[in-house]
Amino acid sequence: MRWRGRRQSSNVEDRRRMRASFPGGMRRIPVRIPMRRGGGMSISTIIILAVLFIGLRAIGIDPLEMLAQGPITEQSAQQAPANDETSQFVRVVLAETEDVWRQLFRAEGAEYSEPTLVLFYSQVESACGFASAASGPFYCPGDNRVYLDLDFFNELARRFQAAGDFAQAYVIAHEVGHHVQNLIGVLPRFNRMRAGMSQAEVNAVSVRVELQADCFAGVWAHHTDQRGLLEEGDIDEALNAAFQIGDDTLQKRTQGYVVPESFNHGTSQQRQRWFLRGYQTGQVSGCDTFEGDV
Ligand SMILES: [Zn+2]
């Protein structure tokens, strides 16, 4: 995707330097000390600590006393700089979704209210509850926010075998698709409906909701293409990502067999088909996943 030099959204909340507080717990801001993967200290870490120790003593602070008080914790991960390349990319993709959806809403005489995207590290608190990075990127209708741990992109490339910047853009556009669903009443309706439904029924409707978000991601890709931002291979990257995170492919990979009643996002083939439909039509009206078979 040709994203460099484009507008970056101001609707990104970078919480990567914060540790979310556990309910009832204490908010802790960790000071991260560079460690080797095995957990042992490298020579450079020891030198940094020694310099810090001497420096703090020189200005009248006793580092040992500080250590005794906490709240210094050690993390094996390096802290990401606030303006790193990946977060810039996320800001540009979010800005592109803002431009496209604003235009599409305006064409219908409606106003698009922009979501906020929260970057977090490891765990986060949202209006939808407490979440860890393991649950993957998500949208919370309660606070109109998309939550994303950038480590997911590494996982997408390695574990899910879906590399490429447009695979990442697809993930963001899918979450923004849920925001669009929230604005047009699809998510509120789903939440009212699910109260009286069995788990299998909830799953079946969930698949339709998810496939529509894929279709909306495709609609966004269509307009992004018209804006001249797509490069050769981008659509293939998105289609491959849609395939790799299909319920059947995920289940085959993790448990070796598939349980269709437990699907809640759609099969690989369905996810590809709906992304492609959105991409080809470029219209929200082409994304009615609630009528007939999907
Ligand atoms: Zn989704």
Image (cartoon, grey):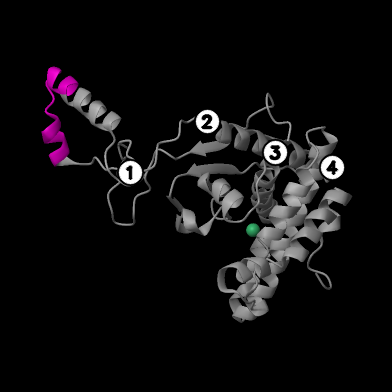
Pointer 2 residue: 84
Q: Give the secondary structure at mark 2.
A: loop
Give the distance between the C-alpha atoms of the residues marked 4 and 1, in whole angstroms: 49 Å
One can see residue 58 in this view:
yes
How many numbered marks have been drawn onto this rendered protein structure?
4
View quadrant of ligand 1 = bottom right
User: Any atom of ligand 1 within 8 Å of the CB at mark 1?
Assistant: no
Instruction: Pick the quarter of the image with the N terminus.
Output: top right
Disc sitting over residue 107 in the figure: 4
Mark toward the viewer: 1 or 3: 1
Percent from the top left, x then y, of residue 58? Answer: 13, 17
Pointer 3 residue: 98
Q: Looking at the image, which residue is at 81% across and 58% down? A: 287
Ranked by sequence position, the earlier of labels 4 and 1 is 1
Whether residues under marks 4 and 1 lie with C-beta atoms below 8 angstroms apart, the answer is: no
Q: Residues in magenta?
A: 54-68
Count neighbours of disc 3 (C-alpha within 10 A) and say few if under 14, some if 14 to 19, many if 20 or more.
many
Ranked by sequence position, the earlier of labels 2 and 3 is 2
Q: Type of residue at label 4? A: Ala
Give the distance between the C-alpha atoms of the residues marked 4 and 3, in whole angstroms: 14 Å
Ranked by sequence position, the earlier of labels 1 and 3 is 1
Q: Type of residue at label 1? A: Gln
Q: Type of residue at label 2? A: Asp
One can see residue 185 in this view:
no
Q: Give the secondary structure at mark 1.
A: loop
Name the outermost residue toward the bottom.
Answer: 198
Q: Give the secondary structure at mark 4.
A: helix
Image: 283 above or below 70: below
Q: Looking at the image, which residue is at 30% across and 46% down? A: 39
Give the distance between the C-alpha atoms of the residues marked 2 and 1, in whole angstroms: 19 Å
Residue 261 occupies which quadrant of the picture? bottom right
Pointer 1 residue: 75
